[in-house]
Amino acid sequence: MTLEWKVVVDAADPHAQAGFWSAALGYEIEDNSPLVERLLGLGAVPEAITTTAHGRRAWLDLAAVRHPDDPYEEESGTGLGRRLLFQRVPEPKTVKNRLHLDLHAGPERRDAEVARLEGLGARVLRKVAEPGGTWTVLADPEGNEFCVQ
């Protein structure tokens, strides 16, 4: 038996994080607006838990990105494959991540990819060269570490 999964990332601004990571990975920001609009129209959710982000109605405290080739629920916009979900939390990031993403650009594209990600708002933390490989450790706009190999 296999399980479906998603990576959930705590965030101060889930919509900004979704924007960064969609551009970084070439993923699509999930469009939950049909579900949000329907629930608002039914009076099932208060306006206060919604916002406008990326040009459409969205949940205030949640935003997700999904691989463009993966299936998704049309009614809710929720991805059914590879996805990252960003959820608003009140506390800031204070320590090193216990889990991080590795982006595989390859040695011939690594420097260009790092420069592209810096242009999106990432910052380089350090470059690593070990017998097992070479990679660059970066931080996303909220300080979450990730590597480009």
Image: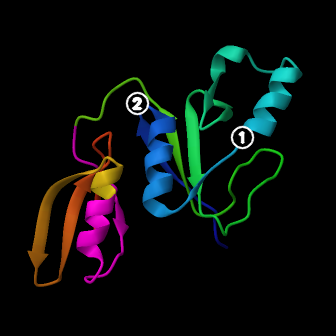
Image position, residue 111 (x, y; %): 23, 71
Seen from the viewer's position, the closer of residues 117 and 133 is 117
Q: Does residue 124 appear left or right of residue 42 in this picture?
A: left
Q: Amino acid at mark 1?
A: Asn
- Location of the C terminus (image quadrant): bottom left
Seen from the viewer's position, the closer of residues 135 and 5 is 135
Q: Earlier in the sequence, mark 2 or mark 1?
A: 2
Q: Is residue 65 above or below residue 4?
A: above
- Give residue 43's quadrant in the image: top right
Q: How many marks?
A: 2
Q: Does residue 49 appear left or right of residue 105 in this picture?
A: right
At x 27%, y 43%, the residue is: 143
Q: Which residues are magenta?
A: 95-116
Name the colour scheme. rainbow
Q: Which mark is residue 87?
A: none
Q: Which residue is mark 2?
A: 12
Q: Is residue 49 above or below residue 71?
A: above
Q: Which mark is residue 32?
A: 1
**Circle 2 SS class:** loop
Q: Does residue 14 appear left or right of residue 121 in this picture?
A: right
At x 73%, y 64%, the residue is: 71
Say if residue 98 shows up in the picture: no
Rounded to the nearest angstrom, the CA distance separating label 2 from label 1 is 20 Å
Q: Is residue 97 magenta?
A: yes
Q: Amino acid at mark 2?
A: Ala
Dot 1 crowding, Cα within 10 Å, few <14, some 14–19, many 20+: many
Q: Is residue 45 magenta?
A: no
Image position, residue 133 (x, y; %): 18, 81
Image position, residue 96 (x, y; %): 22, 46
Dot 2 crowding, Cα within 10 Å, few <14, some 14–19, many 20+: some
